[in-house]
Amino acid sequence: MLESYSRCWTEIDYAAIAHNVEEIQKLVGDTKIMGIVKANAYGHGDVECAKALQKVGVDFFGVSSVDEALHLRQNGIHDSILILGYTPPEHFHYLIEENIIQSLVSYDYAQKLDAYAKEAGTKIRCHCKVDTGMCRTGVIYQVQEKNMDQILAEYRMEHLIVEGIFSHFPVSDDLGQESAAFTKKQIELFEEVCDNLRKEGINPGIRHIQNSYGILNYGDLKMDYCRPGLLYMGVTSDDAIPIASKPDFIPILSWYANVSLVKWIQKGQSVSYGRHFIATKPTKVATVSVGYADGLHRLVSNCGLEVLIHGQKCPIIGNVCMDQCMVDVTQVDDVKEGDVVVLVGRQGDHRVTIDEISRKSHSINNETLSDIAGRVPRLRRREK
Ligand SMILES: *Cc1c(COP(=O)(O)O)cnc(C)c1O
């Protein structure tokens, strides 16, 4: 990887994670943080984010799969790691070898894992997943169906060490009445499960339920851990969604590309595939070296998405290509080959956000960030 220059690159301010963690801590009080670093920390670099989180006391990490857990281990992260998703039986041995915690995705799955651990002559660390309304993974414990017996049985499996219990919110981002009632019911069901366990003389272990919006809208649940991803990266899914708290997060990612060419075109000339932009007057066009194969969705073609050049907002015109796109720079003086274009971040007095890209591509920041392609270098932001 090149050190400082490419056709298109991101810069990540890992130091700002400390500030974002402080903001999270203000909302959740004594609840500890499990840093979610799945999907390469949504493209921000899993190991780098984990190390920045460690510096401010985070001692627990969540990933989606065993290969992500191994990547952390191979890079010197020795803290507790929880796999939030499914690990196929042929990879169970890694859980033992690398001391990784597995979520129990179902009761049947727990039985398989228990049998495997017995065979291996050891015990495997787990967290019990309770499905209080997401209908994704976990033992169902909802108004319509309460499988407390399965949860109890999981805790009693001889070769599993069930150290924690968790659930997940599907609508904690929505403060509307119906969604709020749904989320409150989930919290109630989750507490009920923990109480039922205690009544049976079982310690539920570490309890956690809040993702980023759970933290923003339901910060005071007094769980043992919360599970932020987006928030320590300094963004929400969509800035237009109202939230209950007023945090002050710093987005840690900026995204840049270079101008490769500047030219004037005349009225009637068209730009890019499909000829969706046709100049109505003489127009100065900059060709910029970022495209959809870098993660700039083709949906932002010709819809007025603005980037910064020389600190001024300029719209993308015509279709976004695989490796390039075109920008109207008629209003900007002296634009030339090699100039830096800001897709996300600050330049001069202006700021463009990942949120604008997400909105124009009918998506959310979670997806837009994790779609920034692997070929785009992630550079560590230095003090400026
Ligand atoms: C991805 C994920 C999170 C983190 O979600 P954010 O909205 O980024 O905070 C938390 N918990 C689970 C189970 C997840 O899958």
Image (cartoon, helix red, strand yellow):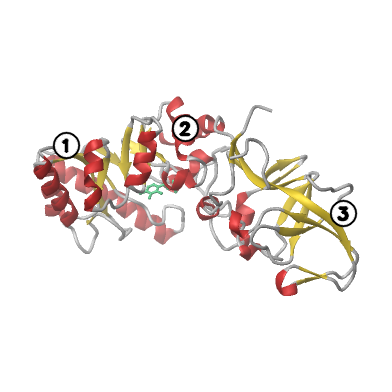
Amino acid at the residue labelled 3: Gln
Going 17% across and 48% down the picture, which residue do you hit?
Answer: 113
- Apparent side of residue 241 relative to residue 335 in the rendered image (left or right): left
Q: Provide the secondary structure element on which disc 3 rests.
A: loop
Which quadrant of the figure has residue 253?
top right
Which disc is residue 331 wearing? Answer: 3
- Give the image quarter of residue 306: bottom right
Circle 3 residues within 10 Å: few <14, some 14–19, many ≥20: few
Tag 1: Cα neighbours inside 10 Å, few (<14), some, or many (≥20)?
some
Give x and y (percent) for residue 246: 54, 41
> Under tag 1, what secondary structure?
loop
Which quadrant is home to the C terminus? top right
Q: CA distance from mark 1 to mark 2?
A: 28 Å
Alpha carbons under labels 3 and 1: distance apart: 66 Å
Residue sitting at x 49%, y 38%:
232
Q: How many marks?
A: 3
Mark 3–mark 1 CB contact (< 8 Å): no
Q: Nearer the viewer, mark 3 or mark 1?
A: 3
Left/right placement of residue 192 relative to residue 278 reads left
Residue type of the residue flagged with mark 2: Lys
Residue under the image location 39 percent in, 42 percent down? 227
Q: Which residue is mark 2?
A: 26
Is disc 2's CB within 8 Å of ligand 1? no
Q: Which residue is mark 1?
A: 203
Placement of 129 over or under 75, stated as above or below: below
Can I make out residue 164 in this image? no
Looking at marks 2 and 3 on the same chain, the residue that comes earlier in the sequence is marked by 2
Q: Which of label 2 and label 3 is nearer to you?
A: 3
